[in-house]
Amino acid sequence: MTFHEMWADLAPIGRHADSGGYRRYAWTGADADCRAWFRAQAEARGLAYETDRNGNQWAWLGDPLAGDAVVTGSHLDSVPDGGAFDGPLGVVSSFAALDELRARGVEFTRPLAITNFGDEEGARFGLACVGSRLAAGQLTKEKAYALRDADGISLPEAMAAAGYDPEAIGADPERLARIGAFVELHVEQGRALDLSGDAVGVASSIWPHGRWRYDFAGEANHAGTTRIADRRDPMLPYAETVLAARREAELAGAVATFGKIAVEPNGVNAIPSLVRGWLDARAADEVTLDQVIGGVRQAALAHAERHGVELAVTRESFTPVVEFQHALRDELTRILGEKTPVLGTGAGHDAGILSASVPTAMLFVRNPTGISHSPAEHAAEDDCTAGVLALADVLEGLACR
Ligand code: HGY
Ligand code: MN
Ligand code: MN
């Protein structure tokens, strides 16, 4: 299948008819269909297919045990109503780049693998990059077992229901030791390439970022009969905290988002007993991020106290700053041309997680609007082609003679 045929074949999987966005959540039917799609593409190319102990998918050319492999790939899962490119562009481009290398008649001097890392977005269980974190030993089996979705289903229960053995999950150092370099192609989630006029760029770093859960506990009561003075309404300090987060982020040149909220009992005519909000915060460095997080928390505590509301703040995930390995980064710009832009990002990626274990690099493909985590996410056809050719050049430079 060509890039376009793969793209068309994958496109309908997990796409929501009303929103046009994708709902490809870990260990659901849509995820299973994406996995079946990946396996079919691998086997159609005669690649040795396997799923690792953490549910990540691998398609090998050459001997996986030979070591020093060049690995490329990304993820196929999505955020709620995510776009078509975040993740899939990297996976489809990896297969297309292999096809391009075979058309060039290159001779591989190192094993090559294409991967689909499971549960990168963390849309269902709340933690991003579960598949790569488990493999890299950055998520313990115990913590993974504690993850629950909105219906109270645990990660192991979901894995088992999807036919995977959750008992097997855990660090996979032997597998990561086989990797000499991991290169992830990803649609840019920003407009730097649009502004510079380039179709492809190379990543320099990933901002430190994390997720914090804010639980505001008040007193449930009747919306129509409870005097304002008698209320302990958790929605008020929550709302004031959302505004405080925006203020802290603007002051620090960072970003902070309350994008997900859960209200109990969630009735139109009931003052909530509990308002649970999730904060996603990111900054160029960890000192700044700490300042933002500290400022938001302090403001939230003051607002909660003023409304007679209890507040508990829980850090659910944190990813330190990632500086991609300079030697590999520079090798990519040597291969692609010294004028290739090198840019940072505030988006997390499996390549960021793996960078603690193996040399990793990223290629970004221009996104004309910069919009991502939205059905409006887009990359132009020519730029996708440029991305495939750039990835092929990089893989040829790294894995072929
Ligand atoms: O949240 C992120 O930055 C990534 O899309 N998982
Ligand atoms: Mn994403
Ligand atoms: Mn992604």
Image (tube, helix red, strand yellow):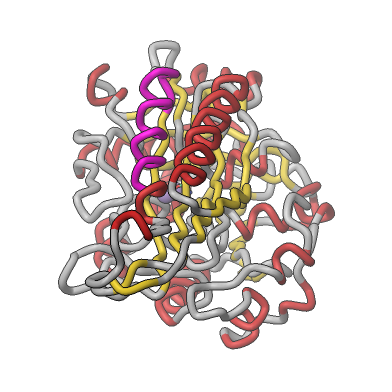
User: Where is 278 relative to 335, above or below?
Assistant: below
User: Is any part of residue 137 visible from this angle?
Assistant: yes
Q: Is residue 350 left or right of residue 253?
A: right
Quadrant location, the N terminus? bottom left
Q: Residue at x 80, y 58 (%)?
A: 171
The image quarter in which residue 81 lies: bottom left
Q: Residue at x 25, y 41 (%)?
A: 371
Principal SS element in the magenta part?
Answer: helix
Residue 243 lies within the magenta run = yes
Q: Which residues are magenta?
A: 239-254
Quadrant location, the C terminus? top right
Q: Is residue 182 left or right of residue 349?
A: right
Residue 227 image point, x, y percent: 29, 62
Q: Nearer the viewer, residue 370 or 390?
A: 370
Q: Residue at x 40, y 76 (%)?
A: 30
The image quarter in which residue 61 lies: bottom right
Q: Is residue 291 left or right of residue 50?
A: left
Residue 217 image point, x, y percent: 51, 60
Residue 314 image point, x, y percent: 62, 50
Q: Nearer the viewer, residue 288 or 130?
A: 288
Q: Is residue 181 left or right of residue 35?
A: right
User: Where is 155 relative to 135, above or below?
Assistant: below
Residue 218 image point, x, y percent: 47, 61
Q: Residue at x 71, y 58 (%)?
A: 134
